[in-house]
Amino acid sequence: MREALLRQAQVLPPITLEEMSGIKLMNRTDTKFVATLEQLNSFLLAVEGEYYIQEINGKRIASYHTTYFDTADFAMYVMHHNGKTRREKVRMRTYLDSDVTFLEVKNKNNHGRTKKKRIEVSTPHTLEKEAEQAVPFLAKCAWYTIDELSPVIENFFSRITLVNFGKTERLTIDFDLRFHNLVTDDRDKFENVVIIELKRDGNVPSPALDIIRRLRIRRSGFSKYCIGSALTNKGLRRNNFKERLRFIAKLENK
């Protein structure tokens, strides 16, 4: 199946990172879907003639490494688990193909809008060695100080990024997710689960959304931090994630 994905990724016309940076989705809405590798392959076949694929240094499937930080009582995880609409995530993400790392703060407001602020850092996945930059950045953008945060989980995954020809929407497609809990040292992975996130300018017509519906790909919230943590840290509450975890397990075993 992965060979088929690689072949199909080579069929779509490329778009460069520089061209991507010019796409400003000012009134953006984000929607997530969870699929299987088989559905992803069908999806990539169906979008041919409608979408570009991002290409960086000749690569069309990018590799990522992310570390999430939280408080000693897992305040950010608990906030998400309890269904709070206003919530925050703090992470360091490395783009492995270019070896560039950013410290990022993601805030979601009461209207479901997500704002992300980030700064480039030189030392991946540790806040202490980046204190000179991290302290003022967190003071400005985050709810927590550097002294309150510690690394709790890391993940690795592959990503395909698509842009429609009209440049009104962007899709990120994540697969091969692997989790390593830095508190419990437990590990887990998804070999058949795919996360598709559709980011579009308001409610403009979406060719991808029509294809997703036709393929019966299910809409579902999916936080890599929360799902990975629920799977690898049995000490965390997970009642509100149980239905989602069962659905993901069902897809993984298809």
Image (spheres, rainbow, N blue to C red):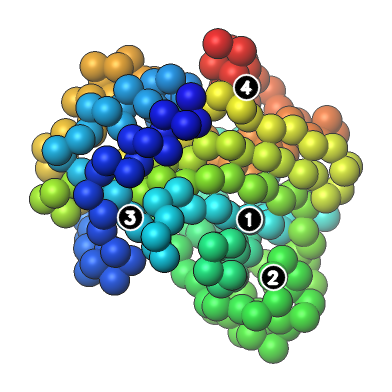
Q: Are marks 2 and 1 in contact (CB under 8 Å)?
A: yes
Q: CA distance from mark 3 to mark 4?
A: 30 Å
Between disc 1 and disc 4, the foreground one is 1
Q: Which residue has dot 2 on it?
A: 124
> Is residue 124 at least partly visible in the picture?
yes
Mark sitting earlier along the chain (1/3): 3
Q: How many neighbours does mark 4 have within 10 angstroms: few (below 14), some (14-19), or many (20 or more)?
A: some
Using the image, tell me which numbered label, if any, was put on residue 245: 4
Q: Which residue has dot 3 on it?
A: 54
In percent of width and height, residue 191 lies at 61, 27
In percent of width and height, residue 5 lies at 41, 33
Q: Secondary structure at mark 4?
A: helix
Q: How many neighbours does mark 2 have within 10 angstroms: few (below 14), some (14-19), or many (20 or more)?
A: many
Mark sitting earlier along the chain (2/1): 1
Q: Residue at 41% of width from left, 65% of height from top?
A: 57
Q: CA distance from mark 3 to mark 2?
A: 24 Å
